[in-house]
Image: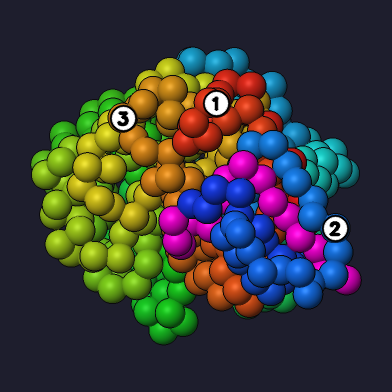
Amino acid sequence: MARKFSADIIFPVSSPPIKNGVVVTDGEGKILEIASPPNPLSKEEGELEYYQGIIVPGFVNAHCHLELSHLKGAIPEKAGLDEFIMGIESLRAASEDEIISASEKADAEMYSAGIVAVGDISNKNYSFRTKTKSKIFYHTFIELLGFHPSRAEYAFEKGIQLAEELKNKNVSLTMHAPYSASIPLLKRIRKYAEENNSVLTMHNQENADENLLFLNKTGKILKRLEALGIDASFFEPTGKSSLLSVLPHLPGKGKIQLVHNIHTTRDEIDVAMNYNPNLYWCFCPNANLYIENRLPDIKMFYDKKLKITLGTDSLASNHQLSILEEIKTVQKNFPEIKFEEILKWATLNGADLLGITGQFGSIEKGKQPGLINISGVGENHFQVTSHAKAIRLI
Ligand SMILES: [Zn+2]
């Protein structure tokens, strides 16, 4: 049976906000009609369901690691990326049951917090079952790690095996970060992405040490590689930042999402966009505050009119997996950025990255994007307050 939803303002995202608009869906949530008042909906069946606040399409979490959900609260805050990674390494030895049950819980939390689609990183197969049977759409980024060139073929083959095990076409093989991918591995990933027309994602410049490794072969990342027993003697610094060092080995066409971008400069953005205009810039502000206690200059990316997405990163570095909480943090720290724009990052841009705009990302006739009511939106409805809440309507 058809349902009619209304609120103080409807934000379709792909078109201007509608004061007291009405969205009509079928029983499954497919959008049948969007109307502005006074609206001619009398022939539609069903009572009008009115909500205080706003209605927005379901959120797209563009960067998550579901398989790290069991590490919630396990790693101290604000200790820096290096300490964080060491912490993760020492805590990975959890039982498979523990990892699976934490993934299930996190998936259910994301669903009720209004997330309809996730770009999710996997290093192992632990989260596959949860993702396959979830009500959320998942695109899985299988992350390949291999700093030493001799490891490239092994890492790639392992990735192919994992992708086959997932039995799902929404999957990519991708690099983790510039400092964990040798040139042969990057070339292998590039070839595969170009052949399969697949989207890539890469952690980028989360911390200053990434640049130090490539600039002059110094910094904590080098020390960590050595501490892990990885031979770094072959590695020649490029004298350039990490991003500019790996850029020539990434596909020049096709979608690539760069995640974090805390230490990315204006000039580097220009060079990167010139090389590949299909770059997406993902921010996970709450994770950045958790790990490094600093934020990227999101306003700079906004001013450059780049395609921005939002992610939660994992529960190892966040108190919750909630895109609304990420929106709040962006708004609190960058009040000059328009709410409608941040909302687009949280919905349509993420859907665009994952190639799912046919169904998700905006309230449009024929789509089934999920409808979310956000209450606690302040007087003018064009900002969320710190106590705003998201409730899934359908
Ligand atoms: Zn991450």
Using the image, tell me which numbered label, if any, was put on residue 47.
Answer: 2
Name the residue that disc number 1 marks.
378
- At horizontal 59% and vertical 57% (from top left) the residue drawn is 37
Q: Position of residue 56 (x, y in %)?
A: 60, 50
- At horizontal 82% and vertical 41% (from top left) the residue drawn is 105
Q: Position of residue 5 (x, y in %)?
A: 73, 55
Q: Does the magenta segment cover residue 261?
A: no
Looking at the rendered image, the quarter that the C terminus falls into is bottom right
Report the amino acid beneath label 3: Glu
In the image, 121 versus 329, the foreground residue is 329
- Range shown magenta: 1-16
Closer to the N terminus: mark 1 or mark 3?
A: 3
Name the residue that disc number 3 marks.
336
Closer to the N terminus: mark 3 or mark 2?
A: 2
Residue 322 at least partly seen: no
* Quadrant of the rendered image containing residue 385: top right
Q: Against 343, is 53 above or below? A: above
Q: Against 361, is 389 above or below? A: above
Report the amino acid beneath label 1: Gly
Mark 1 vs 2: CB contact within 8 A: no
In the image, 34 versus 100, the foreground residue is 34
- At horizontal 34% and vertical 55% (from top left) the residue drawn is 307
